[in-house]
Image (cartoon, rainbow, N blue to C red):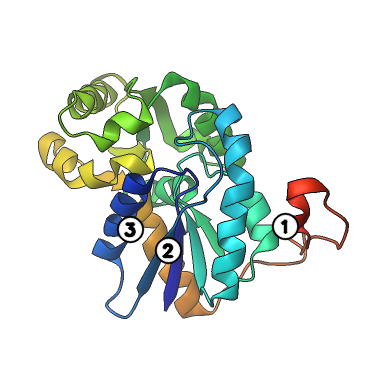
Amino acid sequence: MRLHVVNPNTTASMTVKIAAAARAVALPDTVIDARQPTMGPVSIEGFYDEAFAVPGMLGCIREADRDGADAHVIACFDDTGLDAARAAARAPVIGIGEAGFHMASLIAARFAVVTTLGVSIVPIEHNLRKYGLAERCARVRAAEVPVLALEERNTDALAKISTEITAAIRDDRAEAIVLGCAGMADLANELAATHSLPVIDGVAAAVTLAESLVRLGLKTSRLGPYAAPRSKTYSGPFSLFQP
């Protein structure tokens, strides 16, 4: 089985971290193909960055589709471009945000999300409502840690995330935590041990769900909004994305 895991930003060190998290949980016969675009922002922090990340990410998905990917994982917790990717890709596509929410809902009545910056709270809340899981989420919290700070273990990022988890347990009655950034993938086990509750990394959740879809032979339905895009002209640099 070949899984394509795409980091929608252009930071190579984060792609390496994401790939390691994916390989750590993948089945022995699963090949993890981790990619990143050559165009777009170095990190995705809010709606503005997300808009500029989508074209490059879709390009990666198109290339991986041609290379025989059995499924795609979008490794951005905002599920950047997920709907567009599902319409465009031959293989099924899973976002790490949606995967993390569903995993949490299977093991806890109430979960909380701890993300990076406050600017990401509303996009995550929007997705929770869209997925029908808003009632299961006690609160979305921000540790006020820039995404790229997660690439440096000598910062106080881990302590800030841990503080928010403590508050989620105490004030929100959270029974599980979903880490709201792919850059936190390597922190899940440590934080789970510290706080004695399930801490879910969306990358790991998405990889295991993607493997399940492939094993079951399930693909994206084409009967609704995920129908293949109609053929039309795309101008300028977007001509690369013509259906």
Residue 65 sits above or below residue 173 on the image: below
Q: Which residue is mark 1?
A: 240
Q: Kindly report the distance in space between the C-alpha atoms of the residues bearing marks 1 and 3.
A: 26 Å
In this picture, residue 10 sits left or right of residue 141: right
Query: Closer to us: mark 3 or mark 2?
Result: 3
Mark 3 and mark 2: Cα distance apart in space: 16 Å
Q: Secondary structure at mark 3?
A: helix
Q: Give percent across and percent down for residue 192.
A: 17, 42
Q: Which mark is residue 19?
A: 3
Residue type at mark 3: give it. Answer: Ala
State the mark number for residue 121.
none
Residue underneath mark 2: 209
**Residue 81 in view:** no
Mark 3 or mark 2: whose residue is earlier in sequence:
3
Give the label, 1 or 3, closer to the camera. 1
- Label 1 vs 3, first from the N-terminus: 3
Task: Please name the residue shown 64% across and 59% down the image.
Answer: 86
Q: Amino acid at mark 2?
A: Leu
Q: Is residue 177 left or right of residue 68?
A: left
Q: From this view, report whether residue 131 is shown above or below residue 165.
A: below
